[in-house]
Image: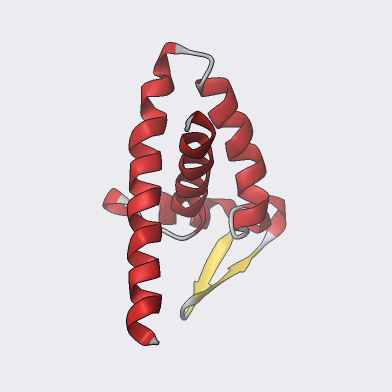
Amino acid sequence: MELLVKILATWRLSALLVYDRGPFRVFQRLREEAGVQYLGDDGWPMGSWGQLLSCTWCVSVWVAVLVWLIDKTPARWILKPLALSGGAILFDEVRGWHEQT
């Protein structure tokens, strides 16, 4: 069960960094500062940081390290809300796929 929480938390935090605008556009502004430019619906990564923040697979490696480090501290309470959010989003996506078929 703990592994599932860590997996979902890693996925959710990675998705926040790569796709979501966030409250007050905090994640979008972070990506823009890193060099991700928005041209329509697609981001166009510029430079190493921009490329990193436009790839969920790339970000998830570093987020997994962060999740592993956080799990060793009293701040590990932050992992469960991320995991719950990730699980809820995944269930919503599955429901959407089911409705399309």
Q: How many labels does the image show?
A: 0
Residue 25: x and y in percent read: 33, 54
- Seen at 47% across and 81% down, the residue is 40
Which residue, as the protein is rendered here, is positioned at the far bottom? Answer: 101
What scheme was used to colour the molecule?
secondary structure
Residue 71: x and y in percent read: 51, 21
Residue 18: x and y in percent read: 51, 56
- Seen at 49% across and 29% down, the residue is 2
- Residue 18 lies, with reference to residue 64, above or below; the image says below
Q: Quadrant of the C terminus?
A: bottom left
- Seen at 33% across and 64% down, the residue is 92
Front one among 21 and 99:
99
- Residue 62 lies, with reference to residue 23, above or below; the image says above
Which residue, as the protein is rendered here, is positioned at the far right? Answer: 48
Q: Is residue 2 left or right of residue 66?
A: left
Which residue, as the protein is rendered here, is positioned at the far left? Answer: 24
Front one among 87 and 41:
87
Q: Is residue 27 left or right of residue 47?
A: left
Q: In this view, does 93 lie to the left or right of 38?
A: left
- Seen at 44% across and 51% down, the residue is 16
Residue 93: x and y in percent read: 38, 67
